[in-house]
């Protein structure tokens, strides 16, 4: 039985209430098992569940009504995507809200409340739209990873911070959905302690499992290095100065943010970028699972307010190599707004 989750973040009231079923008092043995489980939440990341979600998002697998999401750039494809995300999240026990910022754009939001009331929130998000193609890597991969994080972190005990999972609309037109929501959050003076966005996390042709950490603000670079070591993930992590995806929108509105990506700067990235060939078959599911595990480990530790890693010397983003993505509508290389 899943927790009943309340959200009001679409109307910008960060709700922190939850109802749990009553469970018998744990024995010492079950308590130890629970503690071990919660120390490593990423071990619950399910590759098969990731595969099924990505197959649906890219039109490889039919929706329950027999229709297919053939692309996620047009109105119909994005509507089908939102409905699929909502149905899947509701099946996990979440209450889902739509953040409608225009007649054509809607973000999808679901909040996992902390175990005690608080207004502090961590955001984990990805853009759900594509450039009128299957968009498996860009950004079905990130969308599936956030959906899996919602499934895994739902069972995480000891949460002291709310976690909102978000799927942004119209990123490919210039971060439209993420900017709209970030502006609303700023206007409401929302207590968002960090934002983690995933974009293009399904390609790893040299099988080295390397992940790029884009513009990690504040202590976020320390956190990702720390959990990579303490959770024994041992993934090669590279800090970059890449932008032009959703973490930029939140940073511009004053929120501490970070982007997670395959090796975009180091050029081990999909050759199918913004092409019709960006299909389900091109995705490295093991790599996608590895990125999801890293994200779950980092967000899980921060949500439980575990001891912070030792602070490193803060180095400006521009000291690191960067490469920006192309917005579809304008055909421009843009880093910040």
Image (tube, grey):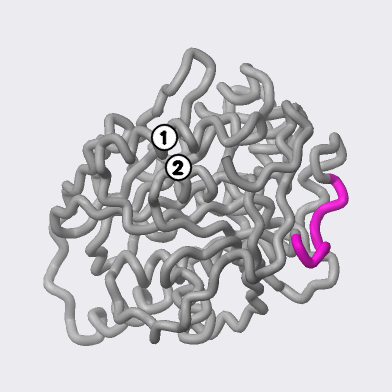
Vertical order, 190 against 11 (above or below): below
Using residue 61 as the reference point, say whether residue 156 is left or right of it. left
Along the line of sight, the residue nearer the viewer: 216 or 62: 216
- Compute the Cα span from label 2 to label 1: 10 Å
The quarter of the displayed image where residue 208 is located = bottom right
| Callout 1 crowding tier (Cα within 10 Å): few <14, some 14–19, many ≥20 | many
Q: Position of residue 102 (x, y in %)?
A: 47, 17
Q: Main secondary structure of the magenta part?
A: loop
Q: Position of residue 76 (x, y in %)?
A: 63, 17
| Callout 2 crowding tier (Cα within 10 Å): few <14, some 14–19, many ≥20 | many
State if disc 1 and disc 2 touch (CB < 8 Å): yes
Q: Tell me which residue sits at (57%, 80%) in the image.
A: 233
* Residue picked out by circle 2: 166
Q: Tell me which residue sits at (49%, 47%) in the image.
A: 125
Q: Tell me which residue sits at (54%, 48%) in the image.
A: 248
State which region is magenta.
265-272
């Amino acid at each position: 039985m899943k927790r009943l989750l309340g959200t009001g973040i679409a109307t910008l009231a960060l709700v922190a209430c939850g109802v749990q079923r009553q469970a018998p008092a744990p024995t010492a043995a079950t308590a130890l098992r629970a503690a071990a489980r919660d120390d490593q939440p990423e071990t619950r990341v399910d590759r098969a569940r990731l595969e099924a979600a990505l197959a649906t998002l890219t039109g490889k697998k039919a929706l329950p009504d027999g229709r297919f999401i053939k692309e996620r750039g047009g109105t119909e494809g994005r509507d089908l995507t939102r409905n699929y995300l909502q149905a899947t999240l509701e099946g996990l026990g979440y209450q889902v809200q739509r953040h409608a910022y225009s007649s054509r754009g809607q973000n999808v939001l679901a909040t996992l409340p902390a175990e005690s009331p608080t207004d502090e929130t961590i955001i984990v998000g990805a853009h759900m739209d594509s450039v009128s193609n299957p968009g498996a890597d860009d950004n079905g991969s990130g969308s599936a990873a956030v959906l899996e994080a919602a499934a895994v972190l739902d069972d995480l005990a000891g949460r002291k911070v709310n976690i909102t999972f978000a799927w942004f609309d119209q990123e490919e037109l210039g971060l439209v959905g993420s900017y709209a929501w970030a502006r609303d959050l700023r206007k409401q003076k929302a207590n968002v302690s960090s934002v983690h966005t995933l974009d293009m996390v399904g390609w790893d042709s040299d099988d080295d499992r390397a992940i790029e950490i884009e513009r990690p603000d504040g202590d976020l670079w320390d956190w990702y290095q720390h959990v990579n070591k303490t959770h024994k993930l041992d993934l090669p992590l590279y800090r970059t100065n890449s932008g032009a995806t959703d973490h930029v929108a939140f940073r511009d509105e004053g929120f501490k943010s970070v982007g997670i990506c395959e090796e975009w700067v180091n050029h081990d990235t999909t050759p199918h970028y913004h092409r019709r060939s960006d299909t389900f078959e091109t995705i490295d599911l093991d790599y996608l699972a590895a990125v999801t595990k890293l994200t779950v480990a980092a967000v899980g530790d921060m949500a439980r307010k575990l001891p912070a890693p030792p602070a490193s010397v803060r180095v400006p983003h521009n000291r690191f190599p960067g490469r920006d993505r192309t917005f579809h509508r304008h055909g421009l290389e843009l880093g910040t707004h």
